[in-house]
Image (cartoon, rainbow, N blue to C red):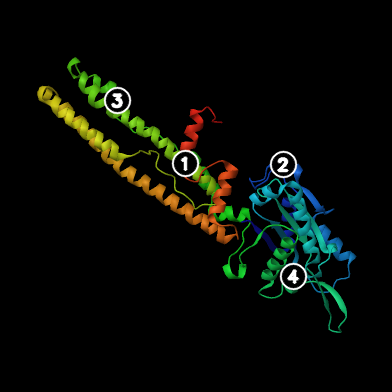
Amino acid sequence: MSYAIVRNEKLTRAEINGKGTHNDRKAKNHSNKDIDPTRTHLNYYIKKNEFTYTKEFDKYIKENNLQGHLRSNSIIMCQMIFTSDQSFFDKIGEKETKRYFDECYKFICNYKNLGEKNIISAVVHLDEGAPHMHLMFIPVVHTKDKECNDIDKICARDFWKGRDSYRKLQDAYFNHVKSKGFDLERGMFVEDTNRKHYTIEEYKKITNYDNTKKLLNEMKLELPEVPDINDISKFSIKRDEKILEKIIKPKDDLIKKLYKENLSLNKELSKQSKVVNEAEKYQKERDKILADNKELHNTVKNLEYGYKEKKKTLENEFEDKSFNLEWQYKNKIHKLEKENQHLHKVIDKFKETITKFIKWICKKFDLPSEDEIIRDFEKETHTFINAEKQIKKEDREKEWGLEK
């Protein structure tokens, strides 16, 4: 089920122009990488500001007889953001999406008898994630002075008076859109969750998103250093070709096979990073990522058995060389065991963090359940959260010639 989402942000004079730069798409290079410039032309205004927000405010003050004293740090505007999740807008289509935001605009015009003239700007963004509307308004309250005369004054404190002011806003907004035929659920009470809403930019700073993504992109996989068959063959004579064929080459091939399997593990980490657009900072993982040591260990045991059979005829001549080779591989196996255990811990912790992170996101931002978030992500990105399913899907597409 989708939720009716409305958020409010109180702004001082020093803060409002930054909002205008974002809302009116005036920046040449957007710091928000979620903005798709090829879709910006789809954005539209329900009410367009003629000037910057500060100039619009100064014009408003000049044209209206307002009471009250404003300081440099006073709240002079509020920004409301109206939205829902992408699946809701996909379901209702373009025409109903426009009607939805029209109703949101009408709602705030009438809320607390605010009046349309006190709305500075209302712009709908279709180029940045799910469709949403930024609505800037001046928090004007209609009240009485000490002599009981009707007056209007700018006072965000009185406009949002009471600890349950946002609860009342959520209730009124939900009831309005529900009465207009939109099938939505009311979000959780912010007073109950005691959560703080962050902007996307703030959230990315908190989670160190950019550094995390950079670290994942810079991860490299390299083959471990193993004895070169050609170097060993310099000391071999014709009679030990079977040792090279039966012992050394299979081990070398197996390590290369494990390397290829590690590419899949790296692909899994990269896929998971799409969900963790806001995850904790990672330390750069070790350059060498090796795979399942269990299979390698069993293979080595089988090779050792075959080696013992051969050893009866080659023992005297190749005893020293065999000992050296065995020592090298045992040392390599021990190293693989340690690195493999660390890798499994990293992946398990990564999956655990993702699960906690999705639950946290849902609670933190009044979003739907984890299952819905995951289902929406998989539908929109054509990517499974389950890494095994994703890898099978990509292998199947590759087999069928459907890979992009």
* Image position of 369 (left or right of 44): left
Badge 4 is on which residue?
156
Q: Disc 4 versus disc 2: distance between alpha carbons?
A: 35 Å
Type of the residue with mark 2: Arg
- What crowding class fits label 2: few (fewer than 14 Cα within 10 Å), some (14-19), or many (20 or more)? few
Does the CB distance between marks 3 and 2 fall below 8 Å? Answer: no
Q: Earlier in the sequence, mark 3 or mark 2?
A: 2
Residue 39 tag number? 2
Which circle marks residue 228 in the picture? 3
* Mark found first going from the N terminus, 1 or 3: 3
Kind of element beneath mark 3? loop
Residue at 41% over, 47% down: 347
> Would you say the residues marked 2 and 1 are in contact, meaning their CB atoms lie under 8 Å apart?
no
Query: Which residue position is annotated with label 1?
Result: 389
Q: Residue at x 77, y 63 (%)?
A: 108
Q: Position of residue 115 (x, y in %)?
A: 83, 65
Closer to the camera: disc 4 or disc 2?
2
First of labels 4, 3 by sequence position:
4
**Is the residue 331 above or below the residue 9 in the image?**
above
Outermost residue toward the bottom in this view: 147
> The residue under label 1 is which amino acid type?
Lys
